[in-house]
Image: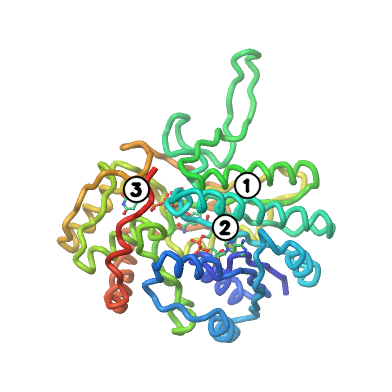
Amino acid sequence: MKNVMILGGDGFCGWPTSLHMAAMGWNVLIVDNLSRRSIANRISAASLTPISSIEKRISAAQKIGNINFVNCDIAIQDGLLKETLASFKPDAIVHFAEQRSAPYSMLGDIERKYTLNNNICGTNNLLSSLVELNLRPHIVHLGTMGVYGYNDVYGEIPEGYLDITIKQTNEDATISYPADPGSIYHMTKCLDHTLMQFYVKNWQFQITDLHQGIVWGTDTEITKSDDNLINRFDYDGEYGTVLNRMLCQAQIGHPLTIYGTGGQTRAFIHVSDTAKCIALACEHPANTGEKLRVFNQVSEVRMVRDLANTIHDQTGAEIKYQENPRKEAAENKLKVSNQGLRSLGFEPVLIADGLMSEIKATVAKYQDRIDMTTIQSKARW
Ligand code: NAD
Ligand code: USQ
């Protein structure tokens, strides 16, 4: 049986992925400091779904497969992280353990510093500890589509690298795709990328960076099977992502909150596909000696306004265009390659595939837990 350590395995993507991999026969160790739960308390924005304590989660999950938990802050407790790596000896490590909200990272001084320190120190502590222990498990890191910026300046967005011709020498070359982050959070993913490139070059690490689009949905077949396995669902202005937010808003009769013109085009993936893609990447490790491998973990590209119109057509929900609280292009085109994961067998679930009604049912079930005061985003940049 192979060992996989899942950093951030208590989170929205990490929990269903941990369950999926345990069900596939991996021996799973979740390492998480439960900071997402603490932040939810601090900003008074609880998950819509009533998620169980980590203890109840783990004991229910042990009926699915081998799965255990260590409470560790990977950005601060590097000694504990190193001990855990030495004793568990992972074959693969999935690294989700970062502060992942762009609006939260732009709330103010404390959140800017926290997001950068947490995300960069966590990644460096992981890599540096592995150097010290002389361990080289395959690392699968969660990046974001936001590292590329969202545009078609260079045509379809390739997977991490861009083929160019150098004007001065007329030579062909392949370079890292130019980074163009739109928030402190997205910038940490660009910095992670450079950190990981250095460890690959200097210490022959095997790393896959998955540049993921916006994750929507909440449940997978496994999370639905037991109340203690239920996944989190964020609908608030800081952590809720656009499609989940709009589906929730439609269900509770709140106008759909479109920022600006709604001409922002973004990449999307359903949470059950997140779990499947991570497992595919773990089963097909990057080769030693290869440069940092990058896959775009996306299923499809959609414009915010089009999604809102679809929801309006289905539910009659009112659409409200509001001043965009973020600095971003009002309208953009986007085309993204996802050949890497497709070549490993990824067959994306699409937004049209009927899963939107599942979310509406979840919202209807827990509607009385909604706090209307958390819906508007407080971050401005
Ligand atoms: P999440 O906040 O729900 O989960 C992150 C988990 O990591 C939480 O359980 C948190 O407690 C833990 N964590 C954070 N810092 C930690 C630390 N220092 N030590 C130990 N644990 C720590 O976020 P998510 O939506 O599950 O996202 C997971 C990863 O996927 C993130 O890296 C995120 O950037 C990336 N991602 C998410 C999305 C999305 O739409 N949700 C899209 C693209 C990429
Ligand atoms: N938006 C609205 N209305 C809303 C919320 C968002 O119009 O109520 C717009 C935003 O202005 C933005 C787009 O929808 O143009 C996406 O916003 P989002 O909050 O859904 O997603 P984002 O902030 O980009 O971040 C999310 C995850 C992050 C991940 C990223 C992937 O929180 O962890 O990295 O999606 S990507 O967007 O592909 O970079």
Residue shown at the point (45%, 67%) measured from the top left: 40
User: What kind of colouring is applied to the model shown?
Assistant: rainbow
User: In the rendering, which numbered label is found on residue 302?
Assistant: 3
Kind of residue sitting beneath label 3: Arg
Label 2 and label 3: CA atoms lie apart by 26 Å
Marks 2 and 1: in contact by CB < 8 Å?
A: yes
Which circle, 2 or 3, is nearer the viewer?
2
Which quarter shows the N terminus? Answer: bottom right
Residue 329 in picture, x, y percent from top left: 36, 36
Tell me which numbered mark, 1 or 2, is placed earlier along the sequence.
2
**Residue 72, quarter of picture:** bottom right
Label 1 and label 3: CA atoms lie apart by 27 Å
Q: Which residue is mark 2?
A: 98
Residue shown at the point (77%, 53%) measured from the top left: 128
Pointer 3 local density, CA inside 10 Å: few below 14, some 14–19, many at least 20: some
Whether the residue carrying mark 3 lies under 8 Å from ligand 2 is answered with no
- Left or right of residue 340, residue 48 in this image: left
Q: In the rendered image, is residue 28 in sight? A: no
Pointer 2 local density, CA inside 10 Å: few below 14, some 14–19, many at least 20: many
Tell me which numbered mark, 1 or 3, is placed earlier along the sequence.
1
- Towards the viewer: 325 or 240: 325
Residue 213 in picture, x, y percent from top left: 46, 51
Q: What secondary structure is found at the residue carrying circle 1?
A: helix
